[in-house]
Image (cartoon, rainbow, N blue to C red):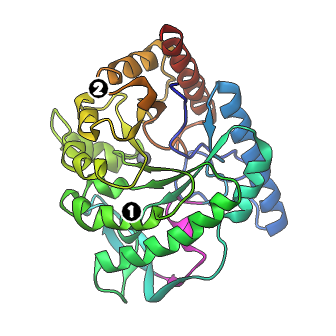
Amino acid sequence: MLKTTITGSLPKPAWLAEPETLWAPWAADDPARLEEAKHDAVRLAIRDQEEAGIDIVTDGEQSRQHFVHGILEKIEGIDFEKKTRIGIRDDRYDADCPTVVSELKRSGPIHAEEVAFARAQTDHALKFTMPGPMTIVDTLADEHYGDRPKMAMAFAEILNQEARELVAAGVDNIQFDEPAFNVYLDAVPTWGVEALNRAVEGLDCTTAVHICYGYGIEANLQWKATLGDVWDQYEAILPALSESDIDQVSLEFAGSRVPLEVIRLLDGKKDVLVGAIDVTTLTAEAPEEVAQVIRAAMEFTSPERIFPCTNCGMVPLPRAVSRGKLKALGAGAALVRAEL
Ligand code: ZN
C-alpha cells in the first residue's frame, strides 16, 4: 500500500545535456557516445529512485530532449525543419514548434529499445511516460488536419500502437502526460478523454494520466498567479476522467492551491497519484511534510487508491535537489505506511 512513484523526468547529468535547462542540447555529438551517455544516465536515474525507496520507477526521461518532442521525431508527417512560432497552452508561452504537413504515421518502433534497456536495469515495477494526444496537438503547428480533435485521434492511434509494443517489452505502467487538460477545460470531457481512451485501448498494463500546473519556470509561475486563491481546474475535468478508461490520475497538491477534496470527484474509481513533492522549490521537503499531504489525501479516498508521487517532472531542478526530494518522498510514504 502507498506505493511511491514519480511523474517521470529527472535532471540530466552535465555530461549528457546542459543542466537545469528545458530543451537542453546534448553534450555529445557522436551518436555512439551519446547512446552510452544516455544509458549511463538511465542507470543512475533508476538507482537514485531505488535508493530513495521509490517503488514504481521510470528511466528519468534521460533519452529525450523534451517530453513532447522526443516521440515526435520518429513520426512521419511532421516537418522538423519547418518550425513555426505559436502560442501554446492557450498562449501562455511561445515556442518554435515543428509543423504537421501530411498524414501522420508511425514509421516503426520509437521507444522499445529504451524500455528494454531500462527493464534490464531493475526488478522494480517500470513506468514509461509519453505525451498525451491533446498535449501533443497543442505543441505542434498544423498545416494538414485543420481540426484539433481529428489530429488528436490520429496521434492517439499512433500512441496506442507504440504503447502495445512497450508493454510487450516489459513496461508495467504507461502514463500519458496531459498538462493541456488543465488549460482547455471544455475540450476534456469531449475529445480530450475520447483520444485518451483510444490511446489506452486494449493495453495489458496499468494506465495513468498526469495533469499538472507545470514546471517552476517563469511563464508558469506568472500563469499560476492569475488563477486565484483556489485552483479549480481539476474540479472541471475530474468527473469526465472518473468515467474514462484510465486506471490512475496523477495530480499536484504539494504547495499548490488545489483543494484535496477534488479527489472525491474520482468517486473511488481511480487510483490517485498524489503529488506530495513541489517541483517549483529548490529545497527538499521534510518527510513529515510529505506524510501530511498523504494523510490529508486519505480523507478523500482509501489508502489502496493512493500512490505518493511528485507534482510534476523534475528535469529543470539541480540534481542534488531532485535527489533530496526523491528521498523525502520515499521516507514520507514510509512514515504513513507505518501508521496503517
Ligand atoms: Zn507535469
Which amino acid, by three-letter code, is at mark 1? Leu
Q: Is residue 296 magenta?
A: no
Left or right: 124 as drawn, with respect to 278: right
Identify the secondary structure beneath mark 1: helix
Decide: is 139 above or below 122: below
Image height of 163 relative to 18, above or below: below
Indicate left or right for 12 with 2 as reference.
right
Residue for point 64% across, 61% down = 166
Say which element carries label 2. Answer: loop
> Mark 2 sits on what residue?
300
Residue 115 location (% of width, % of height)? 70, 56
Relative depth, front residue between 109 and 271: 271
Highlighted range, magenta: 65-82
The residue depicted at 57 percent of the width and 56 percent of the height is 204
- The relative height of residue 226 versus residue 25 in the rendered view (above or below) is above
Is residue 76 shown in magenta?
yes
Mark sitting on residue 335: none
